[in-house]
Amino acid sequence: MHIRGVILEGYSNSGKTSLLRAIKQYQSHDESSERSVVILGEHYSQILNNDHGKYVSLTQEEHIKILRDRVDMLKKLNDWAIKLGPASRRSRGLFYVLERFHLNHRAAFPYSNNEITEIEEQLISLGARCILLTISPEIAEDRIKSRQPDDWINKTEEELQSSMNELLNTQNILRHQAKISKVNTIEINTDNKDWNSYARVIMEDNDFA
């Protein structure tokens, strides 16, 4: 049965949401692609969430459960399609996109390897491809300010430098975790914000198309 998916990882301001939109658009215009699509934004799988105006961080156990629940959902959908018998990718295939998933967990809880490895193995069986979005140090300041420019008007240089350091440090942590993850990961630098081009690279890769 045809099932495949894209997992978008990266720090805030790296372009996950913009690339997600471009992937949705590309997939919807491909006449041979799956009619069944599951797209879950970061609010369905990230660790830190805005809960009624307050930021709440999930524990390691809580986050693992959420990731398992999301993967179980995809497995059940795929199992149902398999049960119905052979069919074309378009008629019964499933395409999914997950935002902030297993690498996000690895970066936050680097010592939970056994649990996250089990989830990654299931993702592999579901045709997952991970995309790690990064930006160059030279544009970190512009990218941080571009998202909510008004918030930075009264910020100090020290605050700006702290945010830049956090961004670049997290990128390096995600790179390291991607190397030891079971899921195949492609790193894409998004300095140029060429979202449609990045989407084509992902969707037209011979190992994924």
Image: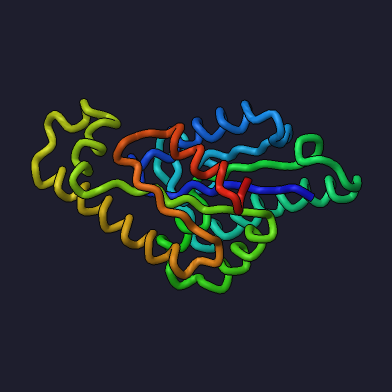
- Count every numbered label the image shows and give the total: 0
How far from the left and from the top, in percent, is residue 174? 38, 59
Image quadrant containing the C terminus: top right
Whether 6 is drawn above or below 147: the answer is below
Residue placed at 47% from the left, 50% from the top? 131
Residue placed at 69% from the left, 60% from the top? 125
How far from the left and from the top, in percent, is residue 202? 52, 44
Image-quadrant location for residue 126: bottom right
Image-quadrant location for residue 36: top right
Q: Nearer the viewer, residue 96 or 61?
A: 96
Report the residue that reaches farthest toward the left. 157
Question: Could you tell whether 14 is left or right of 39 in the image?
Answer: left
Image-quadrant location for residue 27: top right
Residue placed at 59% from the left, 55% from the top? 67
Whether 203 is drawn above or below 153: the answer is below
Q: Nearer the viewer, residue 68 or 103?
A: 103
Question: Could you tell whether 85 is left or right of 143 in the image?
Answer: right
Residue placed at 51% from the left, 72% from the top? 113
Whether 127 is drawn above or below 201: the answer is below
